[in-house]
């Protein structure tokens, strides 16, 4: 196995900083890749939490003026992850969410903040750190999208580049006036094969245009983003580059998500003792002020509250949930309007609808362990992680037929013995409600439900094989560049 060195570039990495699935991937993939002969180090910004957790990191470079203020590059490790940290206080020393102010609006200098990250990624690609000269630079999402662009426009020998899309909806669009300030050739902002994007520039577009390979997080999403609708403006570019685009499913960390050892759940269990789930269900019902009943199917949701996640459709399906004698426990945060509407639904239906607004990793584990089914009614879903955790915890996923949900769940109607859940499409409130009714009938047929749960538990949701696909991609890229 040829050893491979990869520099990953990510704006969030679990367990250090996380706002969504990108962090999970960036945190798990380097560890899973070790078994495949890939040495991965990850470059991330020095947000306050990062600086706190990596206080012992070594300074390997210092700049008096890096994008408008002093900056340093540090190398250190945390929880098995080897990291480079770009410590530039005037760009990153801000509390809270990495991308938005306390009022929830994008930081006005986000273009500069993430160009700085990509610039240093390219420099590491060129050999800035003698102890780690990567064969491949792997950029995640728009925040790292300029890394392939800098490497391209620098015009010298460079490593191979991979751009991964975790969500097409976030494209890093800025005014083209930024181009000169971030040290890219101004012409690039007018070049349709460069940064240019509908009269401005887009960091994601630049990465997709200029990286050697493009991946996204499921095969179905890889197809969907080549359409005008799914591509959200970039469908044409992706159709043109279809020969270098592929979908590799995400896995989950099966140590963190292990119902047999999980410290966050009330009762641990495995395939042999699924009945212990009822004890978790009872605790979950208590925590969400739901009526205590083992017979009422308990539906769980763990999600950002946004249009993407289809949670307005779930609000429309509440009458069905009530008619069918089901309960709902929802944990989420996001859109103010959805938060208000869910809280109102909980007030109107005490004992039946329970809602917690917020972000709570521990409660997320209990929901997986105690709910009978987990709902993911997304309008689009690049991969989705909560349905993978649900498979591992015996919560039967009920999902829309899009993106990675299509690829990871086997519908009860399709595959008899191997079915793991329920899928509905088109993504409408009616289709969702009728699938909830079908799931309710299956829940009351105990052998059927048990079979769904056991097939879910037997599904491989780990990173092992998926990491192997990334390793193969890096190697094939290196071989094609040598050849
Ligand atoms: P996305 O990245 O679009 O938000 P994913 O399903 O890919 O969706 O990943 C979401 C991740 O964040 C999962 O690990 C999920 O458990 C977690 N998560 C989402 N919302 C919450 C919440 N309110 N509390 C705890 N964990 C959450």
Image (spheres, rainbow, N blue to C red):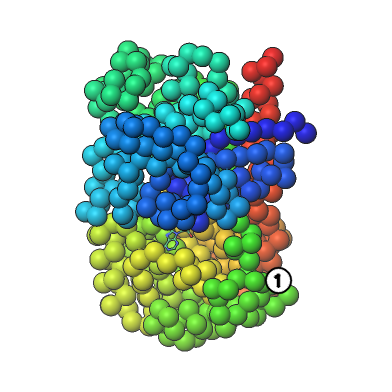
Residue 98 pos. (x, y %): 35, 48
**For residue 469, above or below residue 127:** below
Q: Is residue 414 left or right of residue 161?
A: right
Ligand 1's quadrant is: bottom left
Give the crowd class for mark 1: few <14, some 14-19, many >=20 residues within 10 Å: some
Viewer-nearest residue: 89 or 307: 89
Q: Nearer the viewer, residue 438 or 7?
A: 7
In the image, 171 versus 6, the foreground residue is 6
Q: Is residue 105 left or right of residue 282?
A: left
Residue 161 can be seen, yes or no: no
Provide residue 133's location: percent of width, then percent of height: 59, 29
Q: Is residue 447 left or right of residue 382?
A: right
Looking at the image, which residue sits at the far bottom?
A: 292
Quadrant where the N terminus lies? top right
Q: Is residue 48 above or below residue 11?
A: below
* Residue at the spot of label 1: 271
At 47% across and 56% down in the image, what residue appears?
53
- Please name the residue shown 68% across and 26% down the image: 476
Q: Quadrant of residue 72?
A: top left
Apparent side of residue 351 relative to residue 463 in the rendered image (left or right)? left
């Amino acid at each position: 196995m040829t050893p491979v060195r990869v520099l990953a570039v990510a704006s969030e990495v679990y367990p250090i900083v996380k706002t969504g699935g990108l962090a999970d991937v960036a945190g798990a993939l380097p560890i899973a890749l070790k078994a495949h002969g890939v040495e991965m180090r990850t470059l991330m910004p020095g947000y306050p939490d990062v600086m706190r957790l990596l206080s012992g990191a070594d300074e390997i470079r210092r700049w008096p003026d890096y994008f408008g203020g002093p900056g340093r590059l540090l190398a250190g490790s945390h929880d098995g992850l080897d990291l480079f940290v770009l410590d530039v206080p005037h760009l990153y020393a801000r509390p809270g969410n990495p991308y938005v102010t306390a009022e929830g609006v994008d930081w006005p200098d986000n273009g500069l903040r993430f160009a700085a990250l990509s610039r240093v990624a390219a420099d590491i690609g060129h050999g800035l750190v003698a102890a780690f000269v990567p064969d491949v630079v792997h950029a995640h999402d728009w925040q790292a999208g300029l890394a392939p662009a800098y490497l391209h426009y620098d015009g010298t020998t460079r490593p191979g580049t991979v751009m991964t899309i975790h969500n097409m909806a976030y494209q890093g669009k800025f005014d083209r006036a930024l181009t000169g300030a971030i040290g890219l050739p101004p012409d690039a902002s007018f070049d349709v094969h460069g940064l240019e994007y509908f009269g401005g520039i887009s960091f994601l577009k630049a990465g997709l245009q200029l990286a050697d390979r493009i991946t996204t997080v499921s095969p179905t999403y890889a197809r969907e983003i080549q359409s005008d609708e799914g591509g959200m403006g970039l469908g044409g570019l992706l159709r043109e580059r279809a020969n270098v685009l592929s979908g590799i499913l995400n896995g989950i960390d099966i140590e963190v998500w292990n119902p047999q050892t999980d410290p966050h759940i009330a009762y641990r269990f495995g395939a042999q003792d699924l009945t212990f789930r009822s004890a978790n269900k009872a605790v979950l019902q208590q925590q969400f002020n739901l009526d205590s009943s083992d017979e009422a199917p308990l539906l769980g949701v763990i999600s950002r509250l946004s249009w993407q996640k289809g949670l307005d459709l779930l609000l429309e399906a509440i009458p069905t949930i009530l008619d069918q004698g089901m309960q709902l426990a929802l944990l989420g945060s996001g859109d103010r309007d959805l938060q208000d509407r869910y809280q109102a639904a909980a007030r109107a239906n005490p004992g039946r609808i329970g809602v917690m607004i917020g972000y709570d990793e521990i409660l997320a584990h209990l929901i997986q362990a105690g709910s009978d089914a987990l709902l993911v009614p997304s309008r689009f879903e690049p991969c989705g992680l909560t349905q993978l955790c649900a498979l591992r915890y015996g919560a039967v996923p009920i999902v829309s037929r899009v993106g990675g949900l299509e690829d990871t769940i086997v519908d009860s109607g399709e595959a008899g013995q191997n079915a793991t859940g329920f899928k509905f499409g088109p993504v409408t409130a009616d289709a969702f409600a009728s699938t909830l009714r079908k799931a309710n009938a299956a829940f009351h047929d105990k052998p059927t439900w048990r079979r769904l749960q056991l097939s879910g538990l037997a599904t491989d949701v780990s990173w092992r094989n998926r990491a192997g696909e990334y390793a193969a991609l890096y190697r094939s890229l290196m071989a094609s560049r040598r050849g």
